[in-house]
Image (cartoon, rainbow, N blue to C red):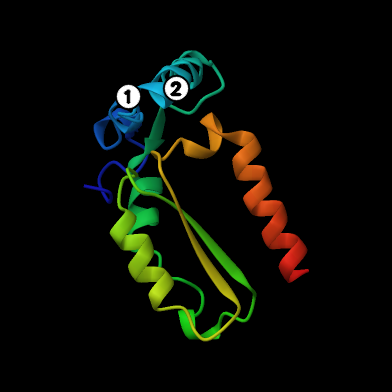
């Protein structure tokens, strides 16, 4: 299909349901619901991508293998995120570099609903690695 209509616009909602990704934990749910609603109602928020762009996400190989990574790397993984096991597996396949895996009790929007906590984790990592 991409060869026939590469510029066909696909709604993001076809493959991502933002409201479904909101945390189920009530204290986070209220904050994240407002954030997601603001995004969805923002006229500058992309709601569609071309079929060729979507296919590019799927078919483009990384420029180098994971084994080439030399930069200290931290993963912040939401336990109720889309695919936490994928990120844990990817982390486990990183080479022997300075690395850290931080699991947080939340959804994919955890960093938006907990900006101070997220900033502290990230800044502490920078202090440790820079």
Quadrant location, the C terminus: bottom right
The image quadrant that residue 90 belongs to is bottom left
Q: Is 116 above or below relative to 55?
A: above
Residue 39 visible: yes
Image mark count: 2
Viewer-nearest residue: 37 or 59: 37
Specify the label residue 19 is tagged with: 1
- Residue 97: % across, % down: 58, 82
Identify the residue at image location x=56%, y=21%: 44
Estimate how packed mark 2 is, as few (under 14), some (14 to 19) or many (20 or more) residues with alpha carbons within 10 Å.
some
Q: Are marks 2 and 1 in contact (CB under 8 Å)?
A: yes
- Residue 123: % across, % down: 72, 53
Question: To which residue does mark 2 refer?
Answer: 36
Identify the residue at image location x=30%, y=29%: 24
Disc 1 secondary structure class: helix
Q: Is 66 above or below relative to 56?
A: below
Q: Given the current orientation, which residue lies at the most extreme left position?
A: 1
């Amino acid at each position: 299909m991409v060869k026939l209509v590469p510029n066909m616009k696909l709604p993001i909602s076809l493959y991502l349901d933002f409201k479904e990704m909101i945390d189920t934990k009530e204290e986070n749910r209220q904050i994240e619901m407002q954030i997601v609603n603001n995004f969805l109602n923002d006229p500058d928020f992309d709601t569609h991508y071309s079929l060729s762009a979507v296919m590019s996400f799927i078919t483009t190989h990384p420029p180098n293998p994971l084994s080439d990574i030399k930069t200290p790397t931290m993963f912040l993984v939401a336990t109720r995120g889309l695919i936490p096991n994928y990120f844990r597996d990817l982390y486990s396949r990183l080479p022997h570099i300075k690395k850290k895996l931080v699991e947080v009790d939340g959804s994919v929007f955890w960093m938006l609903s907990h900006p101070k906590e997220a900033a502290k984790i990230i800044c502490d990592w920078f202090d440790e690695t820079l």
